[in-house]
Amino acid sequence: MTFDDLEIQPQGGSPIHTLASWFAAQGMVHERIGEEEVVAATDGAWGKYELRAIWREDDRVLQFLAFPDVTVQQDKFTLMYETLNLINEQMWLGHFELWTGSGTLVFRHATLLEMADGPAIDPDQADALVESALGELDRFYPVFQFVLWGGKSPSEALTAAMVETHGEA
């Protein structure tokens, strides 16, 4: 299946169907969890990522979560909060957060889907949603590494990770 083969979601259907079709078209291992949730796994530039979309019919909100394979130990929470604050200042869509109960880092973005014909996203919107989340995970993963394992301060880590290279070696 290719991106062009994606079935357009029927009017009034759940946006989870479109995302599940998008994951299938990309060859991503994924699983539907009822009508309101789909979970997928993919490789990013820095490791494996879990992607999760949750549809809340009552609120008309599609919540999209992307998890890098990073767990923060409690003694690093303060550093990570400062790091996430610096990162989130640069974000246009979505944000990163730290779940204190498990030390899990997550990128989260929510979309309100209030349309006359019912909630829907088209394949292009699914592509933009997933690709933007993956892009942000790949973009900021080195910052997390520098802070958690490299001994850098949050501002040093952000500066070091955001150096743009030109060309190839």
Image: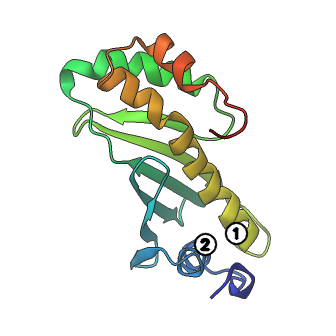
Residue 41, by quadrant, is bottom left
Q: Which of 60 and 7 is in front in this view?
A: 7
Q: Nearer the viewer, residue 131 or 58?
A: 131
Q: Nearer the viewer, residue 18 or 59?
A: 18
Q: CA gap, disc 1 to disc 2?
A: 6 Å
Seen from this angle, which residue lies furthest right? 116
Disc 2 element? helix
Residue 47 appears in the picture as rendered: yes
Compared with residue 158, is residue 92 higher up or lower down, i.e. above or below? below
Residue 115, by quadrant, is bottom right
- Residue at the spot x=57%, y=79% of the render? 17
- Residue at the spot x=39%, y=77% of the render? 31
- Residue at the spot x=52%, y=55% of the render? 64
* Residue 43 rendering spot, x and y as whole percentages: 45, 60
Q: How crowded is mark 1: few (under 14 residues within 10 Å), some or many (20 or more)?
A: many
| Amino acid of disc 1 | Ile
Report the quarter where the N terminus lies. bottom right
Q: Nearer the viewer, residue 163 or 139?
A: 163
Q: Is residue 30 left or right of 55 when viewed as pictured?
A: left
- Residue at the spot x=40%, y=29% of the render? 144
Residue 122 appears in the picture as rendered: no
* Residue 63 rendering spot, x and y as whole percentages: 52, 55
| Amino acid of disc 2 | Pro
Residue 169, by quadrant, is top right
* Residue 121 image label: 1
Disc 1 element? loop
* Circle 1/circle 2 CB separation < 8 Å: yes
